Image (tube, coloured by chain):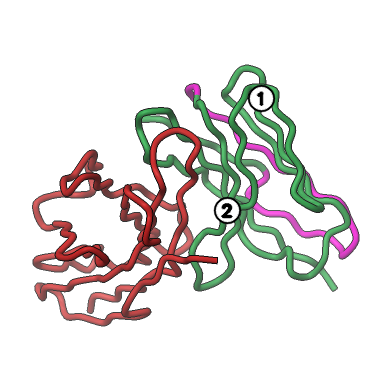
């Protein structure tokens, strides 16, 4: 079964550094998402992306965050200047389209900011 | 914003027991989904519900979409060790693809 893949599985970075988290969504999917899960908490929506632009973003997704689909397969999340509170699991997800199309999630990147 | 509360927060059961958990929302959703998350992994879709009142099964799992569209429950029959994990409900609305996740129910099986 096709799956969403994310790299790296674990990223350690120093506060203030830039990080790029990478995702390869399922190939025929059109909608792409990033979610975040702080340890022990629920999964929170960050951003959705469709037709090469952001379709919705949450309050968490401030100017430090950006997303990009640089080619036909990758979908990236960049955090420009990481803060301690950015430490979390970051999940990429994709879906086929509107309505009856559940999201499929990758296994996540654990980001640790020191 | 929309809030989804799940109960119970955690459950400790013996293998073979049936499990029931539910999810309530402060607002209506058109679609309800149930995901399971194993440690260190992403949420995996278990069941999707698309109509109010719908009852859907997937093996030992049964879920229902509440009539008011503000709640859903998930039942697991005859639990087995691999059922251990965190179960999340999620709501979705047509024309807005994002999921709003519940607070989660952690299931532990006592040997």
Q: Nearer the viewer, residue A78 or A87?
A: A78
**The quadrant where residue B11 appears:** bottom right
Residue A52 placement, left or right of A98: left
Query: Is residue B3 something that shows in the picture?
Result: no
Q: How many marks?
A: 2
Q: Which residue is mark 2?
A: B45
Query: Is residue A78 something that shows in the picture?
Result: yes
Give whichever of discs 2 and 1 has the lower sequence position. Answer: 2
Residue B100 placement, left or right of B24: left
Chain drawn in green:
B
The CA distance from mark 2 to mark 1 is 19 Å
Q: Nearer the viewer, residue A106 or B7?
A: A106
Most extreme residue toward the top is B68
Secondary element under disc 1, as helix, strand or loop, is loop
Identify the image quadrant of the N terminus of chain B. top left
Q: Which residue is mark 1?
A: B66
Residue B95's place in the image compared with A95, above or below, is above
Chain drawn in red:
A
Given contact means CB atoms under 8 Å apart, are the residues at marks 2 and 1 in contact? Answer: no
- Residue at 50% of width from left, 73% of height from top? B40
Identify the image quadrant of the C terminus of chain B. bottom right
- Residue at 16% of width from left, 80% of height from top? A14
- The span shown in magenta is B8-28
**The quadrant where residue A106 appears:** bottom left
How far across and down, in percent of the image, does residue A44 sit? 38, 49
* Residue B23 within the segment the image draws in magenta: yes
- Residue at 67% of width from left, 54% of height from top? B10
**Label number found at residue A35:** none
Residue A49 placement, left or right of A2: left
How far across and down, in percent of the image, does residue A28 sit? 38, 55
Q: Nearer the viewer, residue A75 or A10?
A: A75
Residue A52 placement, left or right of A31: left
């Amino acid at each position: 079964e096709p799956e969403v893949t994310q790299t790296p599985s674990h990223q350690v970075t120093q506060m203030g550094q830039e990080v790029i988290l990478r995702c390869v969504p399922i190939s025929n999917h059109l909608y792409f998402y990033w979610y975040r899960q702080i340890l022990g908490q629920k999964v929170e929506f960050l951003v959705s992306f469709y037709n090469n632009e952001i379709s919705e973003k949450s309050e968490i997704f401030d100017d430090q965050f950006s997303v990009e689909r640089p080619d036909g397969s990758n979908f990236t999340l960049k955090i420009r200047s990481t803060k301690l509170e950015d430490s979390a699991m970051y999940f990429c997800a994709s879906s086929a389209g509107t309505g009856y199309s559940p999201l499929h999630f990758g296994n996540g990147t654990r980001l640790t900011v020191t | 914003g929309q809030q989804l509360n799940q109960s119970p927060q955690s459950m400790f059961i013996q293998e073979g027991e049936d499990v029931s958990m539910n999810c309530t929302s402060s607002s209506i959703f058109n679609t309800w989904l149930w995901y399971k998350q194993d440690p260190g992994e992403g949420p995996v879709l278990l069941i999707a519900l698309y109509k109010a009142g719908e009852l859907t099964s997937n093996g030992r799992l049964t879920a229902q979409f509440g009539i008011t569209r503000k709640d859903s429950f998930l039942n697991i029959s005859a639990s087995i060790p691999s059922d251990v994990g965190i179960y999340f409900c999620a709501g979705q609305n047509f024309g807005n693809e994002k999921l709003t996740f519940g607070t989660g129910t952690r299931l532990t099986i006592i040997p």
